[in-house]
Image: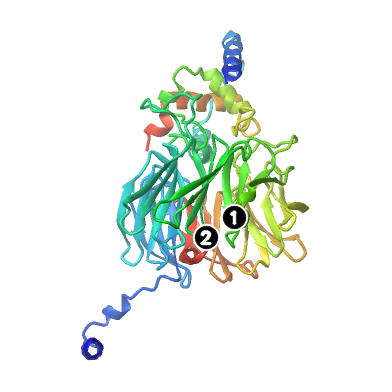
Amino acid sequence: MKNKLKKLSIALLVLGSASCVTTQPQETAQLRPTGDLGVVIERATGQVQIVNHTHNNSLAQIDGLGDLSHASIVYSRDERYAYVFGRDGGLTKIDILKDKIAKRVIQSGNSIGGAISQDGKLVAVSNYTPGGVKVFDAESLELVADIKATELLGHAKNKDGSTKRSKVVGLVDAPDNKFVFSLFDSDEIWVADFSTAQYTVKKFNDIGRAPYDALISPDGRYYIAGLFGEDGMALLDLWNIDKGVKHILKDYGKGDKKLPVYKMPHLEGWAMAGDFAYVPAVGLHKVLVINTKTWQQVDEIDVHGQPVFVMAQPDNRQVWVNFSFPRNDTVQVIDTQTQSLTDTLKPGKGVLHMEFTPRGEHVWMSVRDEHKIQIYNTKDKALLKEVPAASPSGIFFTNRAHQIGL
Amino acid sequence: MFVKSLSLVAVLACFTALPTVASQAQTVSDERKKELTHIVKQDCGSCHGMTLKGGLGTPLLPEDLKGKHVDFLTHTIMHGRPTTAMPPWNALLTQSEARWIALQLKRGNFTNEK
């Protein structure tokens, strides 16, 4: 009976739409798939642009998102909603079908990034003030859990008189509906498990001094935190979580030579290609090549400046590198077969971020001080198009919706 | 912790004892001031927040810098803070430029104008 009704209504719909075709052609024209869309942060003006990477154009601009310095984005698994994590603690859910803000909450005073759970039902935000992680219902943005970071008893109090808590960095999602994050001031890695109705938190202490950022390998197995306070990195194997945190790459870091480090490299973009990871050196004009079976450095490649993002194309054939101030007008390309430098591009001052189209034929770059996005062909490095944008920073395409850790 | 604050005091004391540095007399051109403002917001801002409210780095609003001498701030900008992420900027800035930045920070001039 139900089925019959359904069929009838479909028939009516078809009839109806057939009769409408001549009168309302826009109805169909307005359909907008989201699989080839993306969102670009315009950091100075608190705006974002919705872009299309098939047609290489901008579709809409949305404002009122607050302080977007260092903002990042995750997507709902239906690729309809973008969750924007602002610096001022704002969490904004943008409807990219309707070009408008669907919901917005100010959830803390100062935040740094976020993640969406494996099942797509939870959005987590890592906060500096007050230090901790807040977890929200992805649909309603209602608070589901407030995980407070470790109290810092020896420190000065917050302005409101409360005890300071550790800042939280390097928040990622992991399989089994987990969130993993690092505590900058208390040298910890925590794993919050939301696979059961009552969540649990597993804590690892003394993981190394001052973790400042982290990444998770694309298969969701290894969580790796970079350390500010000492050389080396902290590695947690989530497949063997009971083995605890290991200290790896003990020479990775500033060592004792030291160029001043004006910007610590981002870890999220860590390029993993085959058995190798391509890693930005800290304070050196080098990209390091690491064997991910042994976690030993096997090679180093001289580059133009101190690398910030070292990102592999989706096919892993080439690795693209941008650099920190004052050498941030340049991008270089490394061939992963020969592990040698092949190209040097000069997009302009302030290249902050790069994003590849899902299968890697194009790369988009934000060139902050030139107020534009540049789109390059990854094969011949030809500049295809420039799209105007006010102080663009992060570029995030919707295919991230289906990638662990992004 | 105690040792750290002690060494801060020592640095301060050393500075206040010094006669006014000659390079302070050098002026910073209007064009360079624009560039410096850009550097403060964009590059200092990557740790201290674009609105200087703080991030992994400390907040740099006037209320946060109360009690910190301009010479101490200038020294921090030029030479960094060992054991922290604060790098020395003396390869990119002159003493008078760093001092100009320190003064503007104390006065809140980077955050007032919009």
Q: Examine the image and state in which quarter residue A334 appears.
A: bottom right
In the rendering, which numbered label is found on residue A238? 1
Q: How many marks?
A: 2
Give the image quarter of residue A139.
bottom left
Q: Is residue A274 above or below residue A148?
A: below
The quadrant the N terminus of chain A occupies is bottom left
Label 2 marks which chain's residue?
A
Q: Is residue A61 above or below residue A57?
A: above
Position above or below: A15 against A395: below
Dot 1: within a 10 Å radius of its alpha carbon, few (fewer than 14), some, or many (20 or more) residues? some
Viewer-proximal residue among B72 and B101:
B72
Helix, strand or loop at mark 1: helix
Q: Position of residue A388 (x, y in %)?
A: 45, 58
Disc 1 to disc 2: CB gap under 8 Å:
yes
Q: In this picture, is B110 found above or below A111?
A: above
Left or right: residue B94 versus residue A30 is right
Q: Is residue A289 left or right of residue B31?
A: right
Q: Which residue is mark 2?
A: A175
